[in-house]
Image (tube, grey):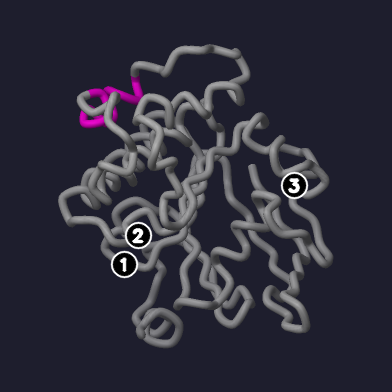
């Protein structure tokens, strides 16, 4: 579904991503792993159009994604949950969810009921301001907002960061349901190994801006974990 070839990116004089080749297969959950500062979020920003490519290409469902303006990517079925959630704190839960509706291909103007079925707390709190929610509830809101557009590809940047264990479990269950039961393709940045092993099919490891290992999650060896993932 998503293919990256020869991607290079610079920040001022620093070469931050080096010749990245990555495949996100349709119907699979692929996890991008690595220590802090190795380029994971930078790569997602390139996919979403927030950063330009110095060279290389990104193909999405046969289309040259890297040539599209950033604001067009959601309309082509890419849902994005950024690091830190980035909800609108002064808007209500319902208003935060409604923001994604214009990107839907069917132009529906009503929040899909399945969002509230996945996250009952959002229905209970739909008239509360987003900034009044707990961190875990805000993360559920961020995921729900990405799902409102009816995505074919869901990209999540460290969805378990800074949230309580019970919500981590719930989000893992929901990602598994979306991927395995509903066929949604998922690209995930995550560092918690138990979570990765629970939800992901495939892994890719970045180190110092380079893709250094990839494979099936059950092939993630102790040697790779010690060399590239252990702090």
How far is disc 1 from disc 2 in space, using C-alphas?
A: 5 Å
Q: Is residue 228 left or right of residue 52?
A: left
Where residue 138 appears, as percent x and y from the top left, is 32, 44
- When asked about the image quadrant of residue 144, the answer is top left
Q: Residue at x 39, y 85 (%)?
A: 223
Q: Above or below — where is 54 with respect to 38?
A: above
Q: Secondary structure at mark 1?
A: helix
Span shown in magenta: 114-123
Q: Are marks 1 and 2 in contact (CB under 8 Å)?
A: yes
The span from disc 3 to disc 2 (Cα, nearest Å) is: 25 Å
- Structural crowding at the residue carrying mark 3, measured as other residues with C-alpha within 10 Å and reported as few (<14), some (14–19) or many (≥20): some
Distance from the alpha carbon under mark 3 to that under mark 1: 29 Å
Image disc number at residue 175? none
Q: Is residue 116 magenta?
A: yes
Tag 2 or tag 3, which sits nearer the N-term? 3
Q: Is residue 51 above or below residue 8?
A: above
Q: Secondary structure at mark 2?
A: helix
- Residue position for label 1: 193
Left or right: residue 31 compared with residue 197: right
Q: Which residue bears the numbered disc 2? A: 196
Quadrant location of the N terminus in the rendered image: top right
In the drawing, what numbered circle is on residue 59? 3
Mark 2 burial class by Cα count in 10 Å: few <14, some 14-19, many 20+: many
Tell me which secondary structure the magenta stretch mostly adopts: helix
Q: Which image quadrant: the C terminus?
A: bottom left
42 vs 205, nearest the viewer:
42
Give the residue drawn at x 45%, y 82%.
228
Image quadrant assignment for residue 42: bottom right
Q: Position of residue 109 (x, y in %)?
A: 51, 12
Sooner in the amino-acid sequence: mark 3 or mark 1: 3
| Residue 58 place in picture, x, y as percent | 74, 52
Q: Report the residue at 69% width, 73% height from top.
A: 17
């Amino acid at each position: 579904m998503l293919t990256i070839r020869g991607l290079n990116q610079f920040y001022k004089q620093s070469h931050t991503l080096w010749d990245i080749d990555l495949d996100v297969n349709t119907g699979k959950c692929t996890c991008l792993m690595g220590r802090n500062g190795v380029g994971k979020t930078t790569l997602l920003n390139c996919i979403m159009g927030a950063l330009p490519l110095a060279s290389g290409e990104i193909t999405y469902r046969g289309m040259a994604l890297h040539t599209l303006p950033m604001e067009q990517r959601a309309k082509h079925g890419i849902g994005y949950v950024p690091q830190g959630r980035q909800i609108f704190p002064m808007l209500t839960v319902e208003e935060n969810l409604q923001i994604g509706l214009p990107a839907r291909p069917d132009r529906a103007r009503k929040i899909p009921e399945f969002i509230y079925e996945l996250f009952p707390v959002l229905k209970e709190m739909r008239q509360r301001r987003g900034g009044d929610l707990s961190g875990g509830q805000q993360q559920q809101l961020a995921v729900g907002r990405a799902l409102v557009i009816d995505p074919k590809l869901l990209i999540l940047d460290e969805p378990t960061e800074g949230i309580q264990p019970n919500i981590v479990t719930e989000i893992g269950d929901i990602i598994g349901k979306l991927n395995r039961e509903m066929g949604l393709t998922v690209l995930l940045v995550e560092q918690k190994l138990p979570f990765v092993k629970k939800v992901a099919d495939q892994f890719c490891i970045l180190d110092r801006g380079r893709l250094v290992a990839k494979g099936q999650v059950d092939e993630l060896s102790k040697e790779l974990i010690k060399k590239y993932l252990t702090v």
